[in-house]
Amino acid sequence: MSRVGRRYGGVLGRITGALLQRISRTGSLRVASDEPELDGQGSCAVLAERLLRDVDRGHVIVPFWSTDQLTIALLAAERHGLRPALSRFEIVADDSIGGEIMWRIGEKFGLRMRRIHVRGNPSRLEDLADWLRRPTPFFIAVDGGSVYGTVPTGIVRMAARLGSTMWPLAVHASRGVRIPGLIADIPLPRATIRVGVSRPLHVTRAASIAEVTADVKRRLDFASRLARDESADASAESTDGEPNA
Amino acid sequence: MNTDVEARLLEIIATELQVPLANVVRGISLRKKLGMDSVAAVNIVFAVEEEFGIRVPETELEHVDSVEAILALLDRLASDAGQKSHPFETEISRSGRPG
């Protein structure tokens, strides 16, 4: 990323971070999920418990779409109940402008951040090797630096190698705007936050990468529909059972 | 390069990329033809390290894009290690995984 890009991302990140911090102090939150234990909750406390339980058992990845990469920061507010889990997770941000914005927001909220190089940069392989040798649980915008709305095989291969449990997540604010050139929605004050959570899936070493990749996309789209309160569509296309993992 | 080393490497690549062994041949780009992504490249290198008992520096990972490139890398690492005899011939003559 160029120096100008870094500066632009940094400034935008600090401004957005301050705005998100302010918004996170107000407004209500509602969780929708096909996990009965989570559905209808008014905070992410139960989700945090489930994530922590899975982290204690093994590796965990929380994938989300890039469109939610700013809104998801709202969950870092103490009052929303996810903070205990976030302290055990890293938030992945690449060295693109969008990643720089994420990085600044993460700093603002006191989150643990992990920087990786963008796709195509040879140093990304070094990042991944280092990461796979010392894996940590993480949240990641899976389609960042890729085709938006698609799940790259790499993240699923990583999950297969680490035997990860994946918790597809979506976060939507009832009021938001989108800055031209940015894929992510920026929530506005007095927004109601709706969190969509798909049932987790456990990925084994022998899993079919192609099948699990398709399943993760289905579950992310499902979580997105839940977060956007498109419940009729969501239930119609809900995935059944565990993937071939 | 020892043919047994190559055969073992082809198996590693086929397993990691989840493709038929017959598809893994010399002269093709693993990225473009067999869908090798960054994590798959790292997985292949990890499996190679485990199989042959060597350590591949992270800086070498970008060269992992073909069977020939990986074989050349293995050869070079063996040479760099200063072993006089061909390391993989020695390893393969032993049963089980090299130490």
Image (cartoon, coloured by chain):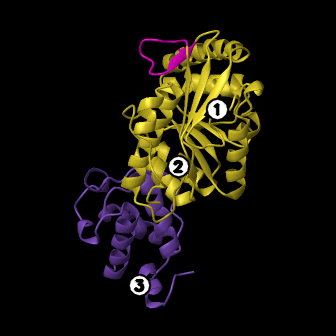
Q: Give the number of the disc on residue A128.
A: 2
Query: Pointer 1: residues within 10 angstroms few (<14), some, or many (20+)?
Result: some
Q: Is residue B86 visible?
A: no
Query: Pointer 3: residues within 10 angstroms few (<14), some, or many (20+)?
Result: some
Disc 2 versus disc 3: nearer the observer: 2
Specify the colour of chain B.
Answer: purple
Specify the colour of chain A.
Answer: yellow
The range drawn in magenta is A175-187
Q: Is residue A239 visible?
A: yes
Q: Which amino acid lies under the numbered mark 2 shown in the image of this protein?
A: Leu
Label located before the other in sequence (2 or 1) = 1
Q: CA distance from mark 2 to mark 1?
A: 37 Å
Left or right relative to A123: residue B67: left
Where does residue A41 sit, x and y in percent of width and height?
A: 68, 32
SS type, badge 1: loop
Residue A204 lies in the magenta-colored region: no
Left or right relative to B70: residue A231: right
Q: Which amino acid lies under the numbered mark 3 shown in the image of this protein?
A: Glu
